[in-house]
């Protein structure tokens, strides 16, 4: 951790301790996660899962997410890639080629 943070300004970090105005250590973040999350998942896995889900929300496909997450197998990415139903619907509707067809059991189909 020290080699990755040496010489970086506090603005380069996501989580800043309001008392010290410095970044939290990895040890402290893990301790806070265990105290407040209420889950069995560790901080590292949870933050990677969250990042992958955010990638999906931003519009990246699962293969882009796989590259960004550095997963060797897309099946690993699929476990934490969760696009919303609205986003998926938007993809279909943006094609403007979708033709609404009545269901076979409806009155319109007869």
Image (spheres, grey):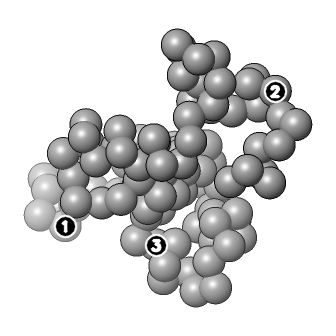
List x then y, in percent, for residue 38: 18, 45
Instruction: Judge whether 76 appears above or below 99 on screen.
Output: below
Residue on which the image places disc 1: 104
Residue 23 as seen in the image, left or right of residue 6: left
Would you say 58 lies left or right of 39 here? right
Q: Earlier in the sequence, mark 2 or mark 3?
A: 2
Q: CA distance from mark 3 to mark 1?
A: 34 Å
Identify the residue at image location x=48%, y=49%. 27
The residue singled out by tag 2 in the image is 9
Which quarter of the figure is the N terminus placed in? Answer: bottom right
Circle 1 SS class? loop
In space, the residues marked 2 and 1 are separated at their CA atoms by 63 Å
Task: Name the residue located 25 percent from the left edge and 37 percent from the top edge.
Answer: 36
Q: Nearer the viewer, mark 2 or mark 1?
A: 2
**Tag 3's secondary structure?**
helix
Give the farthest residue toward the top.
Answer: 19
Picture quadrant of residue 32: top left
Percent from the top left, x then y, of residue 33? 34, 44
| First-in-chain label (2 vs 1) | 2
Indicate which disc residue 78 carries. 3
Residue count near mark 1 (Cα–Cα under 10 Å), binned few <14, some 14–19, many ≥20:
few
Disc 2 and disc 1 in contact, CB within 8 angstroms:
no
Of the numbered discs 3 and 1, the one sitting upstream in the chain is 3
Residues under labels 2 and 3: Cα distance? 35 Å
Q: Counting other residues with Cα less than 10 Å from the Cα at mark 2, is it few (<14), some (14-19), or many (20 or more)?
A: few
Q: Is residue 60 left or right of residue 39?
A: right
């Amino acid at each position: 951790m020290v080699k990755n943070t040496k010489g970086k300004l506090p603005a380069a970090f996501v989580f800043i301790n309001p008392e010290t105005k410095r970044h939290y250590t990895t040890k402290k973040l893990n301790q806070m996660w265990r105290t407040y999350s209420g889950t069995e998942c560790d901080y590292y896995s949870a933050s990677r899962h969250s990042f992958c889900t955010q990638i999906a929300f931003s519009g990246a496909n699962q293969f882009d997410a796989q590259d960004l997450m550095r997963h060797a197998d897309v099946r690993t990415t699929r476990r934490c890639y969760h696009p919303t139903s609205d986003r998926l619907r938007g993809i279909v509707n943006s094609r403007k080629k979708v033709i609404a067809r009545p269901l076979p059991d409806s009155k319109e189909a007869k």
